[in-house]
Image (cartoon, rainbow, N blue to C red):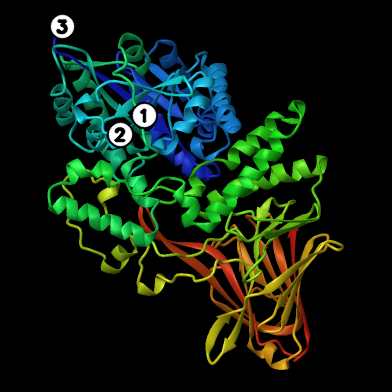
Amino acid sequence: MPKKIAFLMGVHAHQPVGNFPSVLADAHQRCYGPFLRLMARFPEFPFALHVSGWLLDQWLDHDPEDMELLKIMVQRGQAELFTAGYAEPVLAAIPEADRRGQVQFLSQRIHDCFGVKPGGSWLTERVWESSVVSALHQSGVRYVTVDDYHFLCAGVPAERLNGYFTTEEGGERLDIFPIAEGLRYRIPFTQANEVVSYLESMARDDRMEAAIYFDDIEKFGIWPETYEWVYEKGWLEQFIQGILNSPFIEPMTYARYHAQNATRGPVYLPTTSYIEMNEWTLPAQAGEHYAHLVERARNEQTYGQDRPFLRGGIWRNFMMRYPEANHLHKRMLGLSARFHALPALQQTAERRRLLYETQANDAYWHGLFGGLYLPHLRRALYHALLQLEADLDRHHPRPALARYDLDLDGHEEIVLQNGQIQAIIAGNGPAHVLELDVYELAHNFADTLTRQREHYHAKVLTQPDVPPSTGLSNPHDMVQFKHPLCAGDLVFDSTRRALFTDYARRDGERCLLEYDEIRADETDSGVKFLGRAQGARKEISLLTQALLVRYEHPDPVFWSTLEIELNLVMPSCDGPAGRFEFNGEIPGGFGQDIELNGVTQLVLRDEVLGGGVTVGCNMPCRVTSRPCHSVSQSEAGFEKIMQAVTLIFTDFSAPVQNLLMTLTAWPTS
């Protein structure tokens, strides 16, 4: 046969559930729309496309002309649509029933809109666990794509990674295509003619091998500098024309190649993701050690052969690294169990949609693109979770009080709920409120983030000078600063941030109050805490629309040393839609440093939330408010993000033995 190489090009389009409408519109204007319109001009150039279900619905609602173009490309066999979980979950991290349900939900949506049933599936963040094989197979998926790195970790020689392989789980078959890293790092960052030449160098004259590419479409217009490079300077059009004009390259869909070529044989892949993810999922200290091992291997020029075995962590480690991700994940699992316990007729499409949205991957992890640090993405998942939970509670009420180890840390949490609000309280140590939900607002006021050290923080302090690039930069290699940062911005927390965390001042030091002998009173839905070492009692209970926290201590000196910290999450953050109200005046916004004296009532009003919070105290005190910022990295550079309004209540006016604080949330109307 003549010397040929099959080129399988696939792109993956996704936006997180809850992303801002302006971001979605900008992404379509700079990337999705131009890409689809350019591809439509070249009907002889086939490609694969995966669009997450939530984003696909956005396109169908807001970009009908581009969807008509896509439908034409699908009908003429140019565009092959891939399926996956509807809300872009990491399949390995959700229950088996939801794996099948999410994939089947999106596959049916694709069939309804475009008239085809997808045979291929994208794997979110290329997270591979063999446990997903069954759900994919039973959902009609016949092949998936993962990185060639996955195969190298299994010991498969690089020279064999030019076709698809076959795995099975319990006898259920699934074929797997290895995505070529050489292409993933060249497209679209290297000159178009150089990529074409690279592809031609892979052609063989004895068999039809495959050059396999499948990566984020956002590289074609959204990543820094890429819109000008890909469209204005013509990279994509030059690339397509170079492929079509080459006598050695035959572009084709995955479906056609899969149908015309046999498997390369069996393979059993280890649990892993792409190599960068395996680094991101490690805690800071382990990440630094991993980076040292990689650097040593590079210096010794053994990294090429060693890297499959310098594997880092696995995606699930994010639940170990970040208590907030773990908390949300376990809340999602509990809600999934309640949903699937319903009779089939009560598993409505709306309830299913809300459940699937709680499983969207972005807010569970952090790396160069992960969204755990972005409050609006966490809020979107809690919004869906609380809407579904409130709906289920109306039809299948829960007890007012429950105790169980929610987050698998070896200690029980205490759950109080009355149908209007819900408090989840740490049953040990600080005995603070880890989650405070107001169902009418579908908002968790404790949805903040504990600041912890990330291994990339060292770059913030060194701020290396990066010489200007003559070509297109890869965000993985860039060091940029979206906001000016200094050492004072890198403050880390020794205690998980929450509501009603208590401290005492001793010899100028701020000491955390930890409670033991925690008891749950099942008669009035109150929870009483006894701090044996300090002699303090703390009681938390619910009214119809308010959380009550009562402190008791016989020693008057205690009240002069007590500090009560609330980390309140207000959706407007440091924007103009949020403000304090005190004694008929507006002392400032949530992003400002504010000190108030003689406070017995403080209002936080938030137009983004559509409501606010009133914090009350039965004795005058001093309130200090500071915005709590985290420092993280994104594709746009290092940035400061406001996570919460930190209120500290001190200097209680009277040496009484009983302090009562209330927190009441309310909608604007």
- Residue labelled with disc 3: 1
Which element type, helix, strand or loop, lies under badge 1?
Answer: loop
The extreme front residue here reads: 170
- Residue labelled with disc 1: 268
Quarter the C terminus occupies = bottom right
Q: Position of residue 216 (x, y in %)?
A: 36, 35
How many neighbours does mark 1 have within 10 angstroms: few (below 14), some (14-19), or many (20 or more)? Answer: some
- Mark-to-mark CA distance, 3 and 2: 32 Å
Whether residues under marks 3 and 2 lie with C-beta atoms below 8 angstroms apart, the answer is no
Q: Amino acid at mark 1?
A: Tyr
Residue sitting at x 30%, y 65%: 458
How many neighbours does mark 3 have within 10 angstroms: few (below 14), some (14-19), or many (20 or more)? Answer: few
Whether residue 416 sits left or right of residue 563 in the image: it is right
Q: Earlier in the sequence, mark 3 or mark 2?
A: 3
Q: Amino acid at mark 2?
A: Ala
Residue sitting at x 69%, y 76%: 582
Q: Amino acid at mark 3?
A: Met
Which quadrant of the figure has residue 497? bottom right
- Residue labelled with disc 2: 154
Q: Position of residue 518 (x, y in %)?
A: 72, 69
Residue sitting at x 65%, y 73%: 586
- Mark-to-mark CA distance, 2 and 1: 7 Å
Q: Earlier in the sequence, mark 2 or mark 1?
A: 2
* Viewer-nearest of discs 3 and 1: 1
Residue sitting at x 57%, y 58%: 409
Is 292 situated above or below 110?
Answer: below
Whether residues under marks 2 and 1 lie with C-beta atoms below 8 angstroms apart, the answer is yes
- Mark-to-mark CA distance, 3 and 1: 32 Å
The numbered dot on residue 418 is: none
Is 438 situated above or below 629?
Answer: above
